[in-house]
Image (cartoon, rainbow, N blue to C red):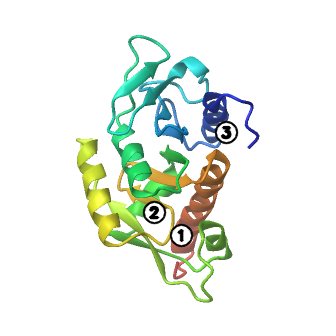
Amino acid sequence: MADPGDPRDVLAAAARLFYDRGWMWGTAGNLSLLLADGTFWITASGKAKGRLTAADFLRIAPGGEVVERGRADDRPSAETSLHDAVYRQFPQAGACFHVHSIPGNVAARLTTGDDLRLPPLEMLKGLGVWDQDPDISLAVFPNHLHVPRIAQELLARFTAAPPRVPGFLIRDHGLTTWGRDAEAALHHVELFEYVFGYIAAARRAGLDA
């Protein structure tokens, strides 16, 4: 993804792509991009993801304080605390994308535990897994109405056991993933969504996903 200069334009372009693919329906989901000073741009709450402009973003300081608004009455996304937690926990992360796709929510429902086992597909290499016969799971968190509680659980779990892949699912909610920049985070969304689609298709076919 080429950077046209304004990071908000990069995020808006990614949001349009995800909207067109059915991964960010209506106003669902949120995207952020970290800046050199430690603040990050994130989509404002309640914005249609297929029609974002630069005015539809807020700049957030570490800890969640709003330092710049596109419009005076805009509010931060409800999931801002998740993005803040990702940037705190993973210093290499430069972008964080959260989508609400049907395949992701179906996949999270196919496990009752705190992990979703990922099939040993070639696609895992794009998520940093180069094992010959990978035994990899994706963390699954419960969907608390108070989102900062999810962020706290994320920090506690990933501090104790760093994840093998750059992402996690919130059951009945969606995927969050990150990358060194917006292009990497976009690729990670695509790869995870491919894996989720495979899992659902394999279950329908009676295969061991």
Please provide percent x and percent y for residue 206. Answer: 53, 79
Residue 17 shows in the view: yes
Question: Are circles 1 and 2 on residues that touch, CB within 8 Å?
Answer: yes
- In the rendered image, the quadrant that contains the N terminus is top right
Disc 1 secondary structure class: helix
Q: Residues within 10 Å of mark 2 (few under 14, many from 20)?
A: many
Establish if 137 lies above or below 158: below
Which residue is more in the foreground, 89 or 120? 89
Q: Which mark is residue 78?
A: none
Residue 175 percent coordinates (x, y): 46, 53
> Which residue position is annotated with label 1?
199
Q: Is residue 189 above or below residue 120?
A: above
User: What amino acid is labelled 2 in the image?
Assistant: Ala
Q: Residue at the location (45% across, 18% down)?
A: 69
- Who's the residue at 39% across and 33% down the image? 61
Q: Position of residue 182 (x, y in %)?
A: 63, 45
Question: Residue 107, which numbered label?
Answer: 2
Of the residues shown, which amino acid type is indicated by label 1?
Ile
Q: Residues within 10 Å of mark 3 (few under 14, many from 20)?
A: some
Q: CA distance from mark 3 to mark 1?
A: 23 Å
Q: Is residue 143 visible?
A: no
Residue type at mark 3?
Leu
For residue 17, the mark is 3
The residue under the point 37% across, 39% down is: 62
Q: Could you say whether the residue bearing mark 2 is in a helix, strand or loop?
A: helix
Most extreme residue toward the front, as rendered? 37
Question: From what the image shows, is residue 68 above or below residue 82?
Answer: above
Vertically, is 198 above or below 103? below
Residue furthest out toward the bottom: 132
